[in-house]
Image (cartoon, rainbow, N blue to C red):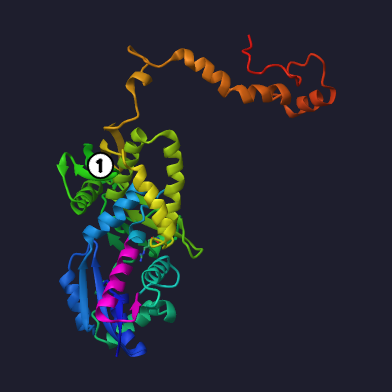
């Protein structure tokens, strides 16, 4: 029997796939479940896979790798899809794909399988990432191929003795990891309906959040957060704590009408307290440490990287190239940010940076000012030079009718008739 390695979450969809792959495809099924920091009962998931017919079930602790090699680079890049989605689900897919490919190699499988539908981004991310890592592997996506419906799945699960959760799970489709929780479907498909409370599980409603604000202090080294409130923490711990602290204050809720890669608009709810807090804090250190031009160009790179990650091109040459730029841009992004969390909001209270470009003596309106005021005048003369010339020749500042008259008649004595006057000379 040939082998297939299946990405397994323990839910109904992927559980059904175990007997399905055996029966319809005649394959020996090996499952892989990645621990990305939010899965509670991994031994039970493993047991369930074996009981459902998997010949082997791998559970991989990928938390540290996820944070260090996927979340941190995305944070350094400032990668927010459509300016708002921190990409929790999108970042996890290439890592899961890597685990699938590694285990396929280990057990000698020549195919991998996943339970994605044909309407989402996740199928693209898995397929494209697997292809990039090993183009010779076959990819099987039975949910996409057979377009199985919930009722059929339940029927099939009954026939195969697969335990069906009593309350048939939540009314939503949910994906979770340390970088965020993605919630879609059900009543959320109506964009006019405000998300009901049960759509959220990591964050309190701001109304129920504490009446006292809480400050968090985050320290960055080359764009990577190393300390929280003065305490050195590894990435997994730092992100977990910020998820709890932020969630408690109702921080990190996102309601987004999103453009999927496959052309559909969808309504997405996210809860990502740690990711949102860290993006705010990181951007703040960059404000102190990046020059204006670097900051402006970084926006272009950020949005390119966000699109690329969203679109499943994590393992691409362009991503490697852009990320190299990002890493280089972070060499002075060191410093501390103090944020105030209060009833769903995040406010920057203070910030400092070792290599800050902010110079109080240049900025001050008070004593000790070192700014060269005389230089301002000359600067403005040159800065305004092209405008002054254009105003002389093209009557900028006049209405279109006036311009028509002026250019037809070129009335003598009109204040700004074209001339060859020395436009650099100061005018009195
Ligand atoms: N729209 C988000 C994305 O494409 C979240 C997808 C959530 N996936 C899920 N199976 N619920 O990244």
From the top left corner, tell me how far across and down residue 190 is, in percent.
45, 60
Residue in the picture at 37% in, 15% down: 370
Would you identify the image quadrant in which residue 173 lies? bottom left
Q: Quick check: which quadrant has ligand 1? A: bottom left
Query: Disc 1 marks which residue?
Result: 221
Task: Tell whether position 97 is magenta.
Answer: yes
From the top left corner, tell me how far across and down residue 109 is, in percent.
30, 81
Would you identify the image quadrant in which residue 134 lies? bottom left
Indicate the secondary structure of the residue bearing disc 1: strand
In the foreground, 152 or 6: 6
Task: Tell whether position 228 is magenta.
Answer: no
Q: Is mark 1 within 8 Å of ligand 1?
A: no
Visible residue check, residue 201:
no
Is residue 329 placed above or below 310 in the rendered structure? Answer: above
Residue extending farthest right: 409
Left/right placement of residue 2 relative to residue 189 reads left
In the foreground, 8 or 126: 126
Q: Count neighbours of disc 1 (C-alpha within 10 A) and say few if under 14, some if 14 to 19, many if 20 or more.
A: some
From the top left corner, tell me how far across and down residue 85 is, in percent.
38, 52
Residue in the picture at 23% in, 63% down: 62
Visible residue check, residue 24:
yes
Q: Quadrant of the N terminus?
A: bottom left
Q: Give the range drawn in magenta.
A: 92-114
């Amino acid at each position: 029997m040939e082998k297939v390695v299946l990405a397994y979450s323990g839910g109904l969809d992927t559980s059904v796939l175990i007997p399905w792959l055996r029966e319809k495809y005649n394959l020996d099924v090996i499952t892989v479940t990645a621990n990305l920091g939010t899965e509670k009962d991994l031994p039970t998931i493993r047991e369930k896979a074996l009981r459902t017919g998997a010949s082997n079930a791998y559970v991989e602790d990928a938390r540290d790798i996820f944070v260090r090699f996927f979340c941190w680079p995305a944070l350094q890049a400032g990668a927010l899809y459509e300016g708002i989605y921190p990409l929790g689900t999108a970042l996890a897919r290439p890592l899961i794909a890597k685990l699938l490919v590694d285990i396929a190699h280990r057990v000698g499988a020549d195919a991998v399988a996943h339970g994605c539908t044909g309407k989402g981004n996740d199928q693209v991310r898995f397929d494209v990432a697997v292809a990039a890592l090993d183009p010779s592997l076959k990819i099987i996506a039975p949910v996409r191929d057979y377009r199985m419906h919930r009722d059929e799945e339940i029927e099939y699960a009954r026939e195969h003795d697969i335990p069906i959760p009593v309350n048939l799970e939540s009314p939503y489709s949910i994906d979770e990891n340390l970088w965020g929780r993605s919630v879609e479907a059900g009543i959320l498909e109506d964009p006019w309906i405000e998300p009901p409370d049960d759509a959220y599980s990591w964050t309190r409603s701001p109304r129920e959040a504490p009446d006292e604000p809480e400050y968090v202090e985050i320290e960055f080294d080359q764009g990577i957060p190393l300390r929280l409130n003065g305490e050195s923490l590894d990435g997994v711990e730092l992100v977990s704590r910020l998820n709890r602290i932020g969630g408690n204050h109702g921080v990190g809720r996102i309601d987004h009408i999103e453009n999927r890669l496959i052309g559909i608009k969808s309504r997405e709810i996210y809860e990502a307290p740690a990711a949102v807090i860290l993006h705010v804090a990181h951007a703040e250190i960059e404000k102190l440490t990046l020059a204006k031009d670097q900051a402006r160009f970084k926006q272009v790179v950020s949005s390119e990287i966000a699109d690329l990650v969203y679109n499943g091109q994590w393992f691409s040459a362009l991503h490697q190239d852009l990320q190299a730029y990002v890493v280089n841009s972070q060499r002075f992004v060191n410093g501390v940010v103090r944020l105030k969390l209060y009833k769903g909001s995040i406010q920057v209270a203070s910030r400092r940076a070792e290599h800050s470009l902010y110079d109080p003596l240049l900025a001050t309106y008070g004593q000790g000012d070192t700014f060269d005021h005389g230089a301002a005048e000359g600067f403005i003369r040159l800065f305004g030079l092209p405008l002054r010339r254009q105003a002389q020749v093209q009557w900028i500042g006049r209405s279109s009718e006036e311009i028509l008259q002026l250019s037809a008649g070129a009335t003598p004595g009109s204040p700004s008739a074209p001339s060859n006057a020395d436009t650099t000379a100061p005018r009195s």
